Amino acid sequence: MNVVVCVKQIPDPADPGALDPTTKTLKRDGKLILDESDSYGVEMALQLVDAAGGGEVTLVSMAPNGETAGLRTALAMGAAKAVLVSDDALQGTDALGTSKVLAKAIERAGQADLVLTATESSDGYTGTVPEQIAELLSLPSVTFAKSITIDGGTAKVQRQTESGYDDVECPLPAVVSVTAGVVEPRYPSFKGIMAAKSKPVDQVGLGDLGVDPGSVGWAGGGQEIVEIATAEARAAGTVVEDDGEAFQKIVDMLAELKIV
């Protein structure tokens, strides 16, 4: 079984850098790490390949400056190889443009039985890329997967809902987005880290994929960021000292807020 996993390399949330005052977008010129939300998809893919008794996991990513640090983490977990799309013309690409590029990269990666993605990235939160990829590849799509099993040519998915989960089946190949916590991602071993250094990363540009530069980047963007602002500081809370009547003070406060 061959599984392709879309992974995003993002600035470290512990040191996210800054916003470009001109483009009003996040600067991505430093070291990038594997988005934690994508580590679940990588782990799920590895487990599905193991359960199938054969096959491999291929990573697909889009990042500036040929950055591979995040990819190497996923390769160290056990993925076999990666396709990295890196091109200056991609700067400013919106969600649809990203989907176009990733769909082409998935095709370049070879015949996949399953494509896995996160539900959304930690630095974008659009949540639209998985479904757009599925549409561009003309594949069925299942979202918010909390469990995936493969039965022959069918994917059986427990799809997370507000009230529980739905049991969904769809034919393979398919695109499935997984939720955080679907599995527990493994930590790369020392052996895996060393092996990852020599695993192949196919770095390509838009020309290699046959993608028109005018359809991505700033030129092809269907959205524009017109303003950025610092989030308002959270107001200090009220501390209620328990003098034996604290419950009444809390009830009065909730009544004043018209909560009770």
Image: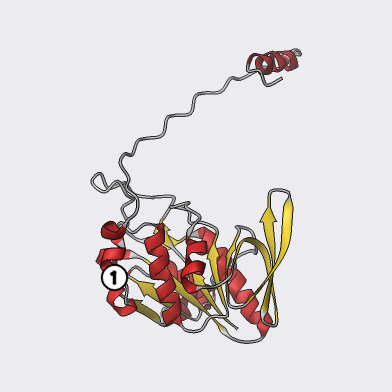
Q: Residue at x 65, y 81 (%)?
A: 50
Q: Secondary structure at mark 1?
A: loop
Rendered view: 253 above or below 22: above
Amino acid type, label 1: Asp
To which quarter of the image does residue 178 belong? bottom right
Q: Which residue is mark 1?
A: 212
Quadrant of image for the N terminus = bottom right
Query: Horizontal placement of 156 versus 133: left or right?
Result: right
Residue that lies at the very extreme toward the right in this rendered image = 244
Q: Residue at x 66, y 18 (%)?
A: 258
Q: Position of residue 177 (x, y in %)?
A: 57, 63
**Dot 1 alpha-carbon crowd within 10 angstroms: few under 14, some 14 to 19, many 20 or more:** few
Quadrant of image for the C terminus = top right
- Looking at the picture, tell me which residue is in the foreground, 110 or 236: 110
Query: Horizontal placement of 255 versus 138: left or right?
Result: right
Q: Position of residue 242 (x, y in %)?
A: 71, 17
Q: Position of residue 214 (x, y in %)?
A: 26, 65
Q: How is the image coloured?
A: secondary structure
- Looking at the picture, tell me which residue is in the foreground, 137 or 183: 137
Rendered view: 113 above or below 156: below
To which quarter of the image does residue 199 belong? bottom left
Q: Residue at x 67, y 83 (%)?
A: 52
Rendered view: 24 above or below 112: above
User: How many marks can you see?
Assistant: 1
Residue that lies at the very extreme toward the left in this rendered image = 22
Query: Horizontal placement of 240 versus 112: left or right?
Result: right
Residue 187 can be seen, yes or no: no
Q: Residue at x 41, y 81 (%)?
A: 108
Q: Position of residue 45 (x, y in %)?
A: 59, 73
Residue 147 can be seen, yes or no: yes
